[in-house]
Image: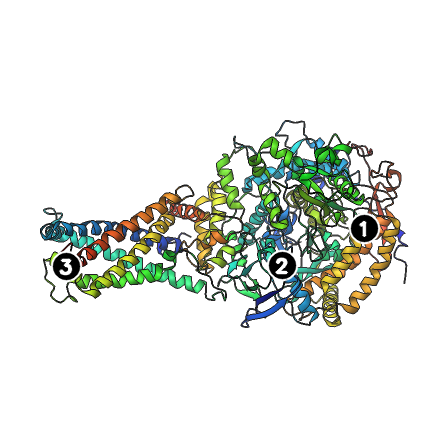
Amino acid sequence: MKLTLRVWRQRNAEEPGAMATYEVDGISADMSFLEMLDTLNEELTLAGDEPVAFDHDCREGICGACSLVINGDAHGPERTTTCQLHMRSFADGDTIDIEPWRASAFPVIKDLVVDRSSFDRIIQSGGYISAATGTAPDAHATPVPKPDADFAFEHAECIGCGACVAACPNGSAMLFTSAKVNHLNVLPQGAPERETRVLDMVAQMDDEGFGGCTLTGECATACPKGIPLPSIAAMNREWLRATRKVRR
Amino acid sequence: MPDYTQYRTGEPAVDTKAPAGPVADRWDTRRFQAKLVNPANRRKHTVIVVGTGLAGGAAGATLAEQGYHVVQFCFQDSPRRAHSVAAQGGINAAKNYRNDGDSIHRLFYDTVKGGDFRARESNVHRLAQISVEIIDQCVAQGVPFAREYGGLLDNRSFGGVQVSRTFYARGQTGQQLLLGAYQALSRQIAAGGVELHARTEMLDLIVVDGKARGIVARDLVTGKIDSYFADAVVLATGGYGNVFYLSTNAMNSNATAVWRAHRRGAYFANPCFTQIHPTCIPRTGDHQSKLTLMSESLRNDGRIWVPRAKGDDRPANQIPEDERDYYLERLYPAFGNLVPRDIASRAAKNVCDEGRGVGPGGQGVYLDFAEAIGRMGRKAVEAKYGNLFDMYQRITDEDPYTVPMRIYPAVHYTMGGLWVDYDLQTTIPGLFAIGEANFSDHGANRLGASALMQGLADGYFVLPATINDYLARNPHTGTVDAQHPAVAETVAETEDRINLLLSVDGDRTPDSFHREIGELMWEYCGMARTEDGLRTALARIPEIREEFWRRIKVPGTGEQFNQSLEKANRIVDYLELAELMCLDALHRAESCGGHFRAESQTPDGEAERRDEEFSYAAAWEFTATGAAPVLHKEDLVFEYVHPTQRSYA
Amino acid sequence: MTRTLWDSTVGKKTIMAVSGLIMLGYLVAHMAGNLKIFFGPGEFDGYAHWLRTMGEPILHYEWALWIVRVGLVAAVVLHGVSAYQLSRRDIRARPAKYVHRKPRASYATRTMRWGGIILALFIVWHVLDLTTGTVHTGFEAGHPYRNVIDTFSTWYGNAIYITAVLAMGLHVQHGFWSAAQTLGVGNATRDRILKTLANLLAAVLTLGFISVPVAVMTGVVS
C-alpha cells in the first residue's frame, strides 16, 4: 500500500508544533501500525532527518505505552491499542492523520510523546491497598464472591494508556480513576481504605488539571480494554458515600 | 587480534553465602545468620533499584517499607509499564489448594528437573518455599486472581508438571501482579520512601574501591547524563532476549545495565541459556518488529499437529484426522502437549525442518481447539481463552474458533544473567541482581509460570532479607560524589560513548544493525547450535561491531529526547553480549534445557546432557571488548534431586 | 483532606445533578399545569389563582409560591454557576483541538452547554413575558389565559418558545441520565432503564409544552 501520513511534529515541550506530511510506500496489510511508522522512521533516518518520536514498548497491547490519535480516534479505528492496530484497517492511498494525546494534564514531550505522570500521581494518592510485605494472612483467609472478583478484574484491566483522557472533549480522567477505585473498593481487602481512597484519588485528579465528566461516553468508546462507562457512576456512588461517611 | 575463543579457566566461582544443612532449613539458617540493620539506621542507607518490573517494583516497595531510602529508575514513562506486565499465563505456588499431591518439595523437584539439572538446589528450594507467601502477599494487595464460585482461588496446570499449582488472572497474570507491585511502590513514593526517576536509563555502574556505589543514568527527556549514589545497587533490569532482535520481549527491554555491570567486574553466568517459547504467533514478513506470545496455557486444551505428509498445503480443516500427526502426543504420551517448553519448541523445529511446517515459509505448526470446542463447548473455551483468541485474530486476521491457530517458537526468556550468590549479590560487593537479570533458579530451562514466581520471590522476600547483611557489614565508607575520580571517569566514559555514537554519521540505521545481529544469533545460537555455526557467528560478530562503529547513523543530538540514540546505545552492548553468548554455547559441548547442541543428542534425537563434564554454572569474567573472557566454574551439587536424563515420554 | 462538594469536580457535578432534578420536577408540574389550558379559561385562571393561595391557611397568600420561586432561583443559580465553572475547567483541560476532527457523542450531549445558555436566556424572557409582563404589551395581570393566547399569537412568541422547548427536551434527555450517573444510580443493568426514562421524560415534556402554542396557532385553544 501507498499512504500519505500527516504527523504532528514538535521538537520539545517549549517549541510549537505543526503537522508534517510524508509519503510511505510498500506498506503491507499485515504490518502493525507501529511497524508502518518504523518504516517511515527508517527512511527519515537515512535521509538525515529526525525520526518521529512515539511511545511504544510491549507491542502486545498490554503495557499501555503506545498513544496515538489516528484520524481523530484515540488508538485508531479499531477498539484496541495502537500497537495491535494493523494496516489492513486502512486502504491503499489513504491519508492518515497522526496526533499525540491532547490534554493539558498530558503535555507533549516531543512529536507524539506525552507526559502521563499525572496518572502515576493519581495512583500514588490512594490507588493501592496498604499491605506491607510479610503482613498478609493466608490467601484463602478471605473468600471473595465471584461476582465481586469479576467486577474487580474487569476494572483492574486498565492499562493506564490515557486513551480515555485523549478521547474526552473535557480531558477528563474519570474513567481511569474510577477503574482503579472500583477495582480496589469492591474487594474486602480494599475496604479499610475505601473512603479515603476515592476522596484522595478524585482530589488528586482534580489537582492535576483534568477536566470534569460530562458523560459524553467518549472515554469508554476509546478504551482498548473495555472499561465500561457505568464505572464512572460506580465511582460517583463511592465518592458520595465516602463524603457522607467522612463528614459523620 | 587475540582469539576470543581462547578463554582461560580461572578460579572456581564459589557461593560463600549458601548455608549448609538440610535444604529445607537453609533459608531460615541464612536469614538468622544475616546481620540486621537497626530500623532507626535504615533511612540513612540509600539503595538504588534499577527497573520497576515484578522484581524491581517489589524490591523498591519492600525496602522502603523497611525504612531504607530507595532511589528507583525505569526507562519507561511509568513504573507500571515494565515488561513483566506482558506475562500471560500465571504464577506457580506450592499451596496444594487442589489436594493433588503438590508440596514445596514437589515444586522444588519439578523446577530442578525442568531446569535440566543446571540450577542450584538451595536457591530453587528457597523459591518453592517462598512461592506460598507470594500468593498471600498478592491477594492482600488486591490482585484479582481467578476465583471459583465459592470465592476461593482457582488453579490450573501448566506445561511440564502434573499438578494444578498455577494461580492466574485470566490471560493477564503478569499485568495484575505488576500492578500490585506498582501500587505498593506508588504508596512508598507518596510516603517519600522511594524517589522515582522515570524515563531515566542506567548507562553504567559506579564502582568505588571495589564496591558498587551508584549508577550513571541518562534522563531520556532532557538527555542529561547524571550520577546517582547509594550504599548498594540492585539491578532488576530483566533479560537480554532482545539480542535476537525478534523476541517476545518489549521493544525497549535491553541488556545495557547488566552488560555494563559485567564490564565493571560482575560475572555473567550461563549466557547461552535462552528459552525459546513454543507458542508464539509466526512472523509474517521482514517488517516484523517483535513476536507475540500466546500463553502456554493454550496447550492445556489445544492439540498441536502438522500434516503427516511433507508439503501438504491443503487448508487445515480439509486434512482428515488420519493424515495429521499429533507429534507431541505421539512422542511423549505421558505429558503429551504439556511437555516443557524446550522440548515442545525443538519438536516444532524438527517437524518444520522435515518440511511439514504450515503457513508462510513452512514456519509454523497448528494448535487446534476443534476437539476442545467439541468437548467443552465454544462458550467454555471463550471464557478460558477468549482474550488470547481475540489477540490472535487481531494479529493474524484468522478466526481461531474455526481455523486452527498457527504457532512457532520464539525467543522468550533468558535463564542466564549476572552470576549471584545465595544472597543475590554479584561478584561486585554491593551490587545485587534480582529477577530475570540474574542467572538464578531456572537452570537451563524455565518452567511455565515460574518467572513471575522468581521475580516476586526475589523482590518481596529474598533481597530485602539479604541486603541487610551487606549494609550492616559495610557501614558508610566515606562519601562519594561527582568529584570522586572513579565517578568522574565513569561519567566521562559514558559521555564519550554517546558522543561517539552521534559523531559517526554513517549510512546505516540502528535497527539495521540490530536486525543483522539478531538474525545471526537466531541462525547460529538459536534453537539448535553446532560448533561450526557458533564459530561462524563468533567470526562474524567482531566484523559487525567494527562496521557498526564505522557506519552507524544517529540523527539528532544527545541533549534531547532521542530514541535513535537510545537504540544505538543498546546495540553497542548487544554486539558484545552476543559474542559471549556464542562463546558460552560453544564451550558447553552438551545439550541441556534450552541449549541444544546438535553434536550432543541421543539416538532418538533427544537432548543429551553430559554431567561428568558440564555439571556447573559457567560464570564469565570480562577482560576487554573482543578479548577472551575468563571462565569461572561453579560446581553444581545435587543432594536431593538426582540428575537423570529427563523423560517426559 | 475532605473537600467540600463545591471544591471537587465530582461534588460540583452532584450539585448540578440535584439542582437539575429539582428543576426537572418543577418542569413536570409546570407542564401538567399548562395542559389545564385545554379545559378553558375558567379552569386555567383558577389554577393560576390557586398557585397563589396554596398552603393557606398555614401560609400567607403567595408565600408558598415565593418559597417555590426562591428554591427555583437557587437551583438555577447553582446549576448555572457550577456549569460555568466546570465548563471553564473543561476547556482549560483540553486547550488544543485535534486537527482531524470528528463529530462525537450524541447531539444532546454536545449541545448541553449551548442548550443551557439558551434555556437561561429563555427563562428571563419567559418571566418578563408571562409573569411580570415587562416585555409583553397588553399584558393583564391576573388573566394568564388571555396572556398566553396573546403571546402565542405572535410569530416571535411562538418561535422563541418552541426553540426553547426543543432545547429543553435535548437538555433533559442527556441531563436526566447524566444526573443519574453523577448521583451514582447508574450501573450496567440499570443503564437501559435510565436511558429509556430519560427519553420518555424528554418526549413527554417537549410534547406537553409544545402542545400549548400549537393549540393556539391551530385555533384549538382561543
Q: Quadrant of the C terminus of chain C?
A: bottom left
Residue shown at 10%/58% (left/top)?
C143
Q: Report the mark closest to the observer, 3 or 1.
A: 3
* Residue B27 location, quadrant: top right
Q: Report the mark closest to the observer, 3 or 2.
A: 3
Q: Residues within 10 Å of mark 3 (few under 14, many from 20)?
A: some
Q: Chain of mark 2?
A: A
Using the image, tell me which numbered label, if any, was put on residue B525: 1
Q: Residues within 10 Å of mark 2 (few under 14, many from 20)?
A: many
- The amino acid beneath tag 3 is Ile
As rendered, which of C160 and A191 lies closer to the eye?
C160
Q: Report the mark closest to the observer, 2 or 1.
A: 2
Q: Chain of mark 3?
A: C
- The amino acid beneath tag 1 is Cys
Q: SS at mark 1? A: loop
Q: SS at mark 2? A: helix
Using the image, tell me which numbered label, if any, was put on residue C149: 3
The CA distance from mark 3 to mark 1 is 93 Å
Q: SS at mark 3? A: helix
The CA distance from mark 2 to mark 1 is 28 Å
Q: Answer yes or no: are tags 3 and 1 on the same subunit.
A: no
Q: Answer yes or no: are tags 3 and 2 on the same subunit.
A: no
As rendered, which of A105 and C206 lies closer to the eye?
C206
Q: Position of residue B183 (x, y in %)?
A: 55, 48
According to the image, label 2 marks what residue?
A: A34
**Which colour style is shown?**
rainbow
Q: Would residue C71 be visible to someone looking at this image?
A: no
- Callout 2–callout 1 Cβ contact below 8 Å: no
